[in-house]
Amino acid sequence: MDFELWYILGLNSVVLDPHAVSPATFPKVEAEKSAELEVVEAVEQPLDEELREILRCESVSIVYQPIVSLASAEPLGYEALTRGPHGSRLATPDALFTQAEESGSLSALERICRAKAVSHLGSISAHQKLFINVHARTVCDSGFVGGETLALLRRQGLEPTQVVFELTERHYVANYQAFQATLRHYREQGYQIAVDDVGAGHSGLLTLAEIKPDYIKIDMSLVRGLDHDLARQAVIRALCTVAKNINAKVVAEGIETEAELTTLISLGVDYGQGYFIAKPQNPKPFASRESIFAINRHQYGHLLGSRFTTLGDLAATGITADETMVVEYAKRVLTETKDPLASMTILRNGVPVGLVMRHYLDRILSAKFGVPLFSRHPVCEIMDGAPLLLDCDIPLDQALEAALTRSADKLYDDIIVLTKAGHYAGVVPMQRLLNGMARLQIDLAKGANPLTGLPGNVAIEEEIHRRARLGQTCSIIYADLDDFKAYNDSYGFEQGDKMIVLLGRLLIYATKRYGTEGDFIGHIGGDDFVIVTAGAEVDCLAQRIAELFSRAVRQCFTPMDRERGAFLGRTREGIEGPMTLTTVSMAIVDCRTQQDYLELGKTAAQLKKRAKREPGSAIVRDRRVTCSSAPTAFPPLVD
């Protein structure tokens, strides 16, 4: 027997000398090969048997992990996660599904998992979602396409609009055209699609471009250590941009630390899940709202006054109807309003399940055979089953952004407003939302400081009030210039105004660079400023402000004064003499619970006096003071 034949027979694992091979050595090698196969079979065979037993007894268990809004902490829904029998080698999802795929039992396993995920879910609000993981091959399975899942949902009182299929990137098929046809089939029924494990190194951006999912789920490998990794932050920021362009929402998986959560909020990620928010359990666990309220909300810029008014403030009562109302009667009700842009919200037990816009209904009924085809049917058959549903407490700028990212055919549809319990609170037409935003911007402009353009006292009070109402912890930095009157008298009012503008611009720069997204900057008046921040590194922010100002302020003095480090001025007592170059003093007050706002200002003023007794730029912090729930007046600090 030649060497090639030995290799073909699989005996190459034995070290052989082709010239030394003899028939006498063959039985020994064959025996070794046989023993090796027996060991392999002893390991593999029980796994097949174990999987068959799991399938026969349906002995998988389901746990649910909340997916929550990183702006309002409200649960978007729950992801159903599968676990094998405890103590089994197939206990983990990876081991279980890998074995099922290798043995050709994947469809059977996923059918069991879907059934249990739906049947064990319990009650959820009509606007909440159940996220179910599916394999691409399973999606194309005849039983799946044939309506098996739909029948299962209906038995549990759920609708397709409440289900999101999670497709892992590594499982996509090469034929996107055929795969998209299958996905269109589900979307037409109301199901939504999520791309799972984005960023884990599989098909990536091509997948997002081809599938155009409703949700982009960022893999935990990108989230881990995100808070100190600028590259990961850049990737997630780019994914958020992609999501907006394809009208998708971003979900971050595997959040395990407060620092990761804080960074994700600052990057504008819509939703999150992970052990830091809630561990997977059955029955469904409650996510801690406090863990998100305690962190700075995702907001859009420090000058937006729209944060001070919520969508609920604009909500109108609107027209509502039960889902069993016939189309003919719905048409009559909407026509009587004499408003071509009127809408009707369809409710089930007080929870919105759909929206009918009058112009859409008119278009359907005016089509050929439209009246005989639809007029006697229930309105739920022609309603939009996936309207825009927003929490009553969402700020107007966030509501407007959500409304403008809708598809073109829904761009001007009304927004349905929900109570905190998920029930109907009213509707906000787009025109009403745009008018509200315009009024707020005008009010903000009226209240802004004319010198710096920063929000004034009213806006500052509203910001403190808003954070207190939401239960957020924050720190307030009060800043003003030392010996500013002496500089103003010596150099003149014009130069004094330039120094105030310099400080305002520096505060904006430093807060953007060293603070957190959503930090608020206000101008009390004169040389007094305030920063409201939820950032944990408030001491670092204040120190950076002091350092930057000490360098930047030198341009406000003559070369001679800069060289000697002093200018000729008068103290408040009228004594003329050399005075050090202007510095900035800061008082930091931490706000945790509720306390009268006037007392907050007085405490800050006392701290500021202490700071002014120190030479140069000084920072004094008081951690005992708490935040007000009903701000009244903002007392200026005194020099």
Image: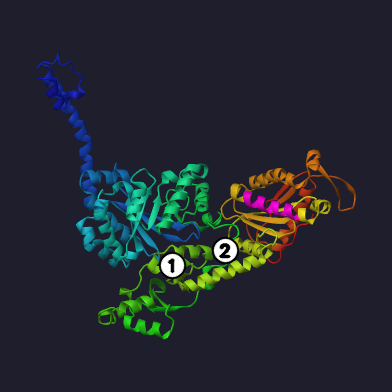
The amino acid beneath tag 2 is Arg
Please determine whether, in this image, residue 419 is positioned above or below residue 213. below
Closer to the camera in the image, 551 or 289 = 551
Asked if residue 281 can be seen in this view, the reply is: no
Colour approach in the figure:
rainbow
Q: Quadrant of residue 28?
A: top left
Closer to the camera in the image, 344 or 26 = 344
Secondary structure beneath label 2: helix
Q: How crowded is mark 1: few (under 14 residues within 10 Å), some or many (20 or more)?
A: many
Q: Quadrant of residue 356?
A: bottom left
> Residue 460 at x, y = what percent?
66, 62
Query: Furthest residue to the right?
Result: 575
Counting labels gives 2
Q: What secondary structure is the stretch in magenta mostly built from?
A: helix
Residue positioned 71% across, 43% down in the render: 551
> Residue 552 at x, y = what percent?
70, 45
- The residue beneath circle 2 is 307
Q: Earlier in the sequence, mark 1 or mark 2?
A: 2
- The residue beneath circle 1 is 389
Q: What stretch is highlighted in magenta?
A: 496-509
From the image, which quarter does the N terminus lie in? top left
Closer to the camera in the image, 598 or 189 = 189
> Residue 133 at x, y = what percent?
32, 53
Q: Is residue 459 left or right of residue 179?
A: right
Query: Furthest residue to the top?
Result: 20
Please determine whether, in this image, residue 360 is positioned above or below residue 491. below
Secondary structure beneath label 1: strand
Residue positioned 53% across, 73% down in the render: 314
Q: How far apart are marks 1 and 2 (CA)?
A: 19 Å
